[in-house]
Image (spheres, rainbow, N blue to C red):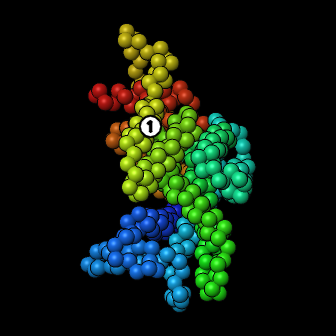
Amino acid sequence: MEAHIVEWLNLSIRWIHIITGIAWIGASFYFNFLENSLNRTVNLRDELAGNLWAVHGGGFYYLEKYKHSPEKIPKDLHWFKWEAYFTLLSGLTLLAVVYYYNASIYMVDPSIADISAFQAVTGGIITLIASWFIYDLMCKSPLVNNMKLFALIGFILVVLLAYGLSQFLSARAAYIHIGALIGTIMVLNVFFVIIPSQKSMVKSAINGDAGDPTLGKKALMRSIHNNYMTLPVLFIMISNHFPSTFGHENSWLVLSALVLVGVGVRHWFNLKGKGIKNIWLLPVSIILLISIVIYTLPKTEAIADINLTKDSPITISDLTALNIIEKHCISCHSEKPSSTLFSTAPKGLMFDSYISIKTNAKSIKAQAVNSSIMPLGNATNMQSKERQQLGIWLDSLDKQ
Ligand code: HEC
């Protein structure tokens, strides 16, 4: 019953998180496009910075951007902020429902660090909060004036943090926390800097004074940071579902490279939007992505370990393999899971029958042989020898 409710909470909150995330990032993409596409020269009234005609959804739209604030601030001024706030709120709730609630299996991996669920959760929360303060301090220091150095130091901190977390939390939890902390920084940028700056802009327009120009500058800087963080954060969030990223033995390195790919692609789009042609950035990002694909290729050395030669082919009997699955997987992946954490088999995967094991051989191999993602949190203490045996047996299924 409880597990069933948690599953539906997970699904519903994830749904809200994705909807609000799309609304937020979508609006930010739209305004980026707008800035880059405004007509800034032809037939403009003096007070305008630019205008744009567009056709969408069965109608024509005409939009004007003012150089400065309009003479009178309209009563119905639309603000873009709730999308961002709700993305953070739903994201943190999701983090709590999925990771913190079942921290002993989702956050703790005894083969990485011998910590308690409480320590793992506390470490995760402290990381999120501390990252914001460090980033905010960096923004308030003179470093912020040197964009390239700022980016370099920011990236090095992400790499260090990804490495640090991967020595402490389960790989999956380490990934989600890096994603969550980047997302948190982006939303807090909106909350603490961008929206207050817009409020002061509106206030000074009403009072007719010049306002504080440094506020606008700071907000612009945070907007630029957010712009560069969008693609990496999305990449990290979805890679959490793909075992060759967080399941790799150097998961932190894979994550760091994914961040670079995201920033590279983003920068290319930004340049393109400004009409600057760059020929190397996109190809280099794609080459980096392909390098990650190659780097994360499953290793075959596991089998070499048991001295497999042509003359003495090792075979693993069906019985041995099924016993391994029975011992390490069936408590969750069964029609009636005995684990108290799940009322139905996770992802609908049940390994009660030979046929279903055979059908899912590839994903079983990805999760339990090429990586040690399953059993979740290595709840059943599966040994590497058992993984090798399972791998050899799964391979032999192909040859039947
Ligand atoms: C403690 C419970 C538990 C045990 C034991 C367990 N799993 Fe899982 N398994 C899960 C959960 C939870 C998920 C869904 C993970 C997610 O949300 O991405 C899952 C997902 C999977 C997936 C699908 C992954 C994907 O994202 O497509 C495979 C394949 C899998 N498990 C195989 C195994 C194998 C093989 C074993 C035994 C070696 C095993 N599991 C043991 C809980 C468990």
Left or right, 97 with respect to 135, comes to: left
Residue 352 versus residue 344 in the image, above or below: above
Residue type for callout 1: Leu
Using the rendered image of the protein, determine whether residue 357 is visible from the camera's viewpoint: no
Residue 59 position within the rendered picture, expressed as x and y whole percent measured from the top left: 28, 80
The quarter in which the C terminus is drawn is: top left
Task: For mark 1, give the secondary structure.
Answer: helix
Left or right, 277 with respect to 231, comes to: left
Residue 313: quarter of image: top left
Q: Nearer the viewer, residue 259 or 310?
A: 259
Q: Nearer the viewer, residue 343 or 306?
A: 306
Residue 173 position within the rendered picture, expressed as x and y whole percent measured from the top left: 60, 48
Determine which residue is flagged by label 1: 288
The quarter in which the N terminus is drawn is: bottom right
Q: How many marks?
A: 1
Residue 162: quarter of image: top right
Using the rendered image of the protein, determine whether residue 223 is visible from the camera's viewpoint: yes
Q: Nearer the viewer, residue 156 or 369?
A: 156
Residue count near mark 1 (Cα–Cα under 10 Å), binned few <14, some 14–19, many ≥20: some
Residue 350 position within the rendered picture, expressed as x and y whole percent measured from the top left: 42, 48
Q: Which residue is at 34% across, 38% downward?
A: 358
